Image: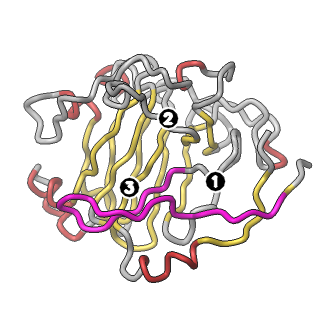
Amino acid sequence: MRPYQTAAVAAIAVIAPLAGAGTTTTFDFESLVHGEIVTNQFAPLMTVSALNPNRPFDIVAAFDTSLMGTADPDLEGPPWAGGNLAISDTETQLGRALIIAENNTGAGDGILDNPDDEGSRPAGQLIFDFASKVSLFGFDVVDIEGNVMEFSRLEFFSAGDSIATVGFDEFTNNASSFYDSTIVFGDNTANRISPITADALVAAGFADAASGFDRVIIHAGGSSAYDNIVIPAPSGLLALAGGWLMLAPTRRRR
């Protein structure tokens, strides 16, 4: 059993305005340690789970992308090999990100000994459930390779029903309404996917998305990690933000 220490941690990393979308909140997962298994750390606003068709276990874990010499160098950076988070003079440091775990070594104490992302194709599903309907969803992604081959995609749900799907290939297809010229996928790349709004889904033909969605599934086609989940700030959250800074048991960094 690894030691615990009491520390002030923030369930919500950033509360900030987003142009055209009101106030948003970003989950950056920096309160997690490398290998930490994710369950309800970000409840009640968001819970995270996984389905891994390649293993007898379904584990979401934190992966510290800033470390070197990990089980997957493709997730390590900066420097990044490309993508819109690697084009500035100071490349973006992502820190902890979420992976669908390929192994469960050491899972008994809540921290994987050697975290690695699932490399099979498909890798599985990373599932985000929200306490109430939200109207936008954004994220960062590391190491999406051959997006057309892997068929990675986002699926949006409302009350259990699938209401919209956006393939990762649409971000690089200039004929798509979700096209972003700054996104470049490939080995060891890092990209920020601008928040996809309910209005944008409706404009793309998904009329049932008009009232928002309460679940988003990232269907990961292969090896990859995800960070900086952006959703709208719930009503009243700014006034209650101090309540989200709590004393909680957190595992000591390795």
Which class describes the residues within 10 Å of circle 1: few (<14), some (14-19), or many (20+)?
Answer: some
**Residue depicted at x 82% and y 38%:** 106
Give the Cα separation between the discs numbered 1 and 2. 15 Å
**Residue depicted at x 69% and y 39%:** 34
* Foreground of the two, 83 or 201: 83
User: Is residue 141 rendered to the left or right of residue 166?
Assistant: right
Residue kind at label 1, given as amino acid type:
Ser
Q: Position of residue 26 (x, y in %)?
A: 43, 57
Residue matched to label 2: 93
Q: Quadrant of residue 72?
A: top right
Residue kind at label 3, given as amino acid type:
Val
Residues in magenta, as a range: 5-28
Q: Quadrant of residue 191?
A: top left
Q: Which of the marked residues, 3 or 2, is nearer the chain's N terminus? A: 2
User: Is residue 23 rendered to the left or right of residue 20?
Assistant: right
In the image, residue 114 above or below residue 47: above
Q: Position of residue 198 (x, y in %)?
A: 21, 60
Residue matched to label 3: 230
Q: Which of the marked residues, 3 or 1, is nearer the chain's N terminus? A: 1
In the image, residue 37 above or below residue 141: below
Q: Which of the marked residues, 1 or 2, is nearer the chain's N terminus? A: 1
